[in-house]
Image: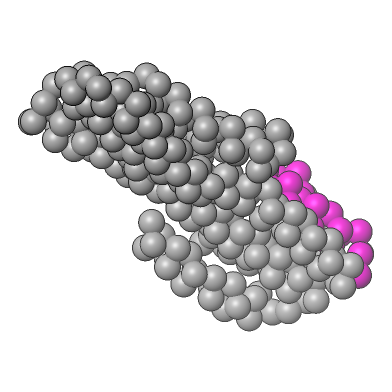
Amino acid sequence: MDIASIVGVVSGMGFVLGTILLGSSLMTFVNIPSVLIVMGGTLAAVMIGYPLGDFLSIFKTSMKIFIFKIQAPEEIIANLVETSNKARKGGLLSIEGDIQTTSDPYLAQALQMTVDGVKTADIAAIMQKKMALTKKNLDVGSNILSSMGAYAPAFGMIGTLIGLVQMLASLDDPSSIGPKMAVAMITTFYGAVMANLFFIPMSDKLTGRNEEEIINMNIIFEGIISIREGEHPKLMEDKLNIYLGDTKESKEKK
């Protein structure tokens, strides 16, 4: 459970609602047509811009913002060093048992190819292609949320224009100008809040999550190639520890 994301959403909504209540009634900012224009228009635009499968996957992918579990890179490096020591002492066949104990399918496939004696170049090519495909799939969620962050304010402005047109069409009734102007501005308010409190920050958080997963895959890739080439475990460990600096920078950004 990501406490920072939960606290951020709750506190952000609290500040906005609190500011509203300090100066007016909450019902002043409730307008169903405005919500429909912003949310409906944003979702429709995303459906136009992305395949249906990608659009539907965003609901599942968004859960990673609040619930995210990933193996620590330090633990992966330690396991790879242990595997490397085992292979150095007993040969590549001695690491066959590690295939059954790992829960990472990417690592399991790489270990299996190593045990089977697949050439280093072929292992590297397969692992790199799988890494690229994984990155592409991971980026879909953050790209959609980023697009929603751009669409929401635009549809908020569209809703405002609709409201202004309706207001101008009824200038013969001065008593209706104020309420209709308020409704017109509320739509822009909805678009700005949805984009800057939800969609854009969530896209940033998913991008960070994806970077962590790709860093782990790179560590596994480098480790497996080192094991296949018979490099000394200490040399491999020194090479892999470089990624720990990237991991710290990624966490600091979040």
Q: Main secondary structure of the magenta part?
A: helix
State the image quarter where residue 53 is shown: top right
The residue sitting at the left extreme is 22
Q: Which of the pair 147/120 is nearer the observer?
A: 147
Q: How many marks?
A: 0
Residue 103 part of the magenta-drawn span: yes
State the image quarter where residue 162 is shown: top left
Residue 80 shows in this picture: no
Residue 204 shows in this picture: yes
The x, y position of residue 10, in whole percent, is 27, 34
Residue 216 relative to residue 226: left or right: left
The x, y position of residue 75, in whole percent, is 54, 57
Residue at screen point 69% across, 79% down: 232
Image quadrant occupied by the C terminus = bottom left
Q: Which of the pair 170/77 is nearer the observer?
A: 170
State the image quarter where residue 83 is shown: bottom right
Residue at screen point 32% across, 30% down: 168
Residue 99 relative to residue 248: left or right: right
The colour style of the image is one colour
Image quadrant occupied by the N terminus = top left
The x, y position of residue 81, in whole percent, is 63, 67
Residue at screen point 40% across, 48% down: 201
Residue 166 part of the magenta-drawn span: no
Instruction: Provide the residue span drawn in magenta.
Output: 99-119
The x, y position of residue 30, in whole percent, is 28, 21
Residue at screen point 17% across, 20% down: 175
